[in-house]
Image (spheres, grey):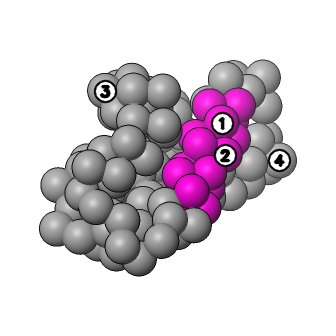
Amino acid sequence: METREVSERLLEYGVRAIRAVEALPRSLVGRRVGDQLLRSSISVGANYEEAQGAESREDFVHKLQIALKEVRESNYWLRLLAKADTIPANRLSAILDESNQLRAMLSKAVATTKGKRKTTSPRSISNCQSQI
């Protein structure tokens, strides 16, 4: 998958999360969980974008790992909202599915990049980036 496609999917994921947070009730739980979901979900794309400007292979991997941690966290908050029926599960199914797909893609990218030899050139990093 092209880097631009992944960037666009992550941007759309952030937009969906914003819409989900906006749909939350104006209760204590809605505000607390909404804050956590908003922070984690929109930082996935931001960290991925930062990875594109990485200064080294290690920096690239580190930023991808942060994006992966954030997508895992946002997936947790989405599942919690569905389980607590704060937002009906059927309204969250599409974003949960996308969250799982993004998690799998980022996991693979991290594993692939980590598996490369330490002598990996910047050109090889571009090749790995284009795989996700």
Q: Quadrant of residue 14?
A: top left
Q: Name the residue tied to disc 4.
A: 83
Please tell me whether residue 6 is drawn above or below residue 59 in the rendered image: above
Q: Name the residue tied to disc 3.
A: 4
Magenta segment:
96-112
Q: Name the residue tied to disc 2.
A: 104
Q: Residues within 10 Å of mark 3 (few under 14, many from 20)?
A: few
Of residues 30 and 81, the one drawn nearer to the viewer in this rendering:
81
SS at mark 2 in the image:
helix
Q: Is residue 119 magenta?
A: no
Sequence-first disc among 4 and 1: 4
The residue type indicated by label 1 comes to Gln
The residue type indicated by label 2 comes to Ala
Q: Is residue 109 magenta?
A: yes
Of residues 15 and 44, the one drawn nearer to the viewer in this rendering:
44
Gap in angstroms between the C-alphas marked 2 and 3: 17 Å
SS at mark 3 in the image:
helix
Residue 107 makes an appearance in the image: yes
The residue type indicated by label 3 comes to Arg
The residue lying at 50 percent from left, 65 percent from top is: 116
Q: Name the residue tied to disc 1.
A: 101
Q: Given the current orientation, which residue lies at the most extreme right position?
A: 83
Main SS type for the magenta part?
A: helix
Q: Residues within 10 Å of mark 2 (few under 14, many from 20)?
A: some
**Is 61 situated left or right of 81 in this image?**
left
Q: Given the current orientation, which residue lies at the most extreme front position?
A: 119
The residue lying at 76 percent from left, 41 percent from top is: 82
The residue lying at 57 percent from left, 57 percent from top is: 112
